[in-house]
Image (cartoon, rainbow, N blue to C red):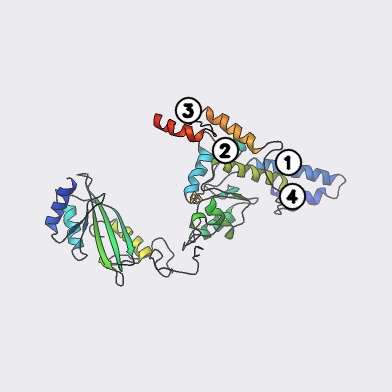
């Protein structure tokens, strides 16, 4: 399916999804609440068939006081791709987990918990992935600081 | 080897002429050590690709220097090439690997990351600023990543150091005499000329006259 058709099809499933303009991949901004239901339908709908979660990352928009979570979906059967963007509050970054839809999400979500501190509801095993277990803080947040870091001299 | 290095000095030194003999033995041992360096298969990031270029790829062929047998076990290796960034979590493992290697062991730090933290020196929560904060380093090879030529220069420097450095009278004590490993009577221009000769035989390389470069370049690009 090409991008406009794809977006129309997904918007039929999720009417409050808004389209982001000027992106390489078709991108939809969706609310956090219906995320699991939407992902399940995207995976199971025979015309869409997004059976692969390629990547999942988080962006820290500190000025806007939010984290943006990106879910990069792909369909091997149909050869089309889609990005879902979800915004969560920076103070209380909670989203439902996608583990039950895409098993790979377990580790992808552990990674963004580890480095960004996103909290995934119902995640079976939300531990650190890269850093030591006793690490304090989430180093990829823009306001992270510790004693080990060196400031770049001007 | 253990018997020779442990017992020989004590046996030989009292006899007349023993000192001279010991020196000869030193030279023999150091020569053989310097020509049978077995690197450990150890690479942590992009510099490791360059190390593979230098050790495994056809053109550069490290076998010429007796150092091609990369070993996957630290017990069998005696050259540790730190190729890549060392992060906080890697540091204890690096230390363990180093300690598992048998004496005499040598360490080469290649790339700015292994020397000082490189591009990740500032604003990094995890990069160790130089592998020598964790283990002692014998030779540093700068670059990001170093070219294979630089890698070999470092290797030759290390070999020179091994050849001149140690005596079985004081095992483990290493002299670091190396200023430059350029053979005598050779200048940088000679090397550049040799490189140019070599590269001009290469079908993939287009030689551009350095002086006329500016004018040439745009024309060649258009042809291309
Ligand atoms: S020195 Fe450069 S090439 Fe080497 S590991 Fe560091 S960043 Fe990569």
In the image, is the residue at mark 2 within 8 Å of ligand 1 by its beta carbon?
Answer: no
Mark 2, Cα crowd under 10 Å, few <14 / some 14-19 / many 20+, is: many
- Residue B28's tag is 1
Quarter of the figure with the C terminus of chain B: top left
Residue position marked by numbered label 4 in the rendering: B168
- Badge 1 element: helix
Residue position marked by numbered label 3 in the rendering: B203
Q: Quadrant of residue B188?
A: top right
Q: Nearer the viewer, mark 1 or mark 2?
A: 2
Residue position marked by numbered label 2 in the rendering: B62
Q: Provide the chain ID for the residue under circle 1.
A: B
Mark closest to the chain's N terminus, 2 or 4: 2
Gap in Å between the C-alphas at discs 1 and 4?
A: 11 Å
Q: Would residue A17 be visible to someone looking at this image? A: yes
The residue furthest left is A12
Mark closest to the chain's N terminus, 3 or 1: 1
């Amino acid at each position: 399916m090409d991008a406009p058709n794809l977006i129309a099809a997904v918007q039929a499933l999720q009417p409050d999804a808004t389209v982001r303009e000027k992106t390489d991949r078709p991108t939809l901004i969706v609310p956090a609440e219906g995320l699991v239901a939407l992902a399940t339908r995207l995976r199971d709908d025979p015309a869409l068939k997004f059976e692969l979660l390629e990547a999942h990352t988080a962006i820290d928009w500190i000025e806007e006081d939010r984290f943006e979570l990106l879910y990069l979906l792909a369909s091997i059967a149909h050869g089309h791709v889609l990005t879902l963007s979800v915004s969560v509050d920076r103070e209380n970054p909670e989203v439902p987990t996608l583990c039950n839809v895409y098993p790979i999400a377990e580790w992808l979500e552990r990674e963004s918990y580890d480095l960004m501190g996103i909290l995934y509801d119902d995640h079976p095993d939300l531990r650190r992935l890269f850093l030591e277990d006793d690490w304090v803080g989430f180093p990829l947040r823009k306001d992270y600081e510790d004693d080990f870091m060196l400031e770049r001299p001007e | 080897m253990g018997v020779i290095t442990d017992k020989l000095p004590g046996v030989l030194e009292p006899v007349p002429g023993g000192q001279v003999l010991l020196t000869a033995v030193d030279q023999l041992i150091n020569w053989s050590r310097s020509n049978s360096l077995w690197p450990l298969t150890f690479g942590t990031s992009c510099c490791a690709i360059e190390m593979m270029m230098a050790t495994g790829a056809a053109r550069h062929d490290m076998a010429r220097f007796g150092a091609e047998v990369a070993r996957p076990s630290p017990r069998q290796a005696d050259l540790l090439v730190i190729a890549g960034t060392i992060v906080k979590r890697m540091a204890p493992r690096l230390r363990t690997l180093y300690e598992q290697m048998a004496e005499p062991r040598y360490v080469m730090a290649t790339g700015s990351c292994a020397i000082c933290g490189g591009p990740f020196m500032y604003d990094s929560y995890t990069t160790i600023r130089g592998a020598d904060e964790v283990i002692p380093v014998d030779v540093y090879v700068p670059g990001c990543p170093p070219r294979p030529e630089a890698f070999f220069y470092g290797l030759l420097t290390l070999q020179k150091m091994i050849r001149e450095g140690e005596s079985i009278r004081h095992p483990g004590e290493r002299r670091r005499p190396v200023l430059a490993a350029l053979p005598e009577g050779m200048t940088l221009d000679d090397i550049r000329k040799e490189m140019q000769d070599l590269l001009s035989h290469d079908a993939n390389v287009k030689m551009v006259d350095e002086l006329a470069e500016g004018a040439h370049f745009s024309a060649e690009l258009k042809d291309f």
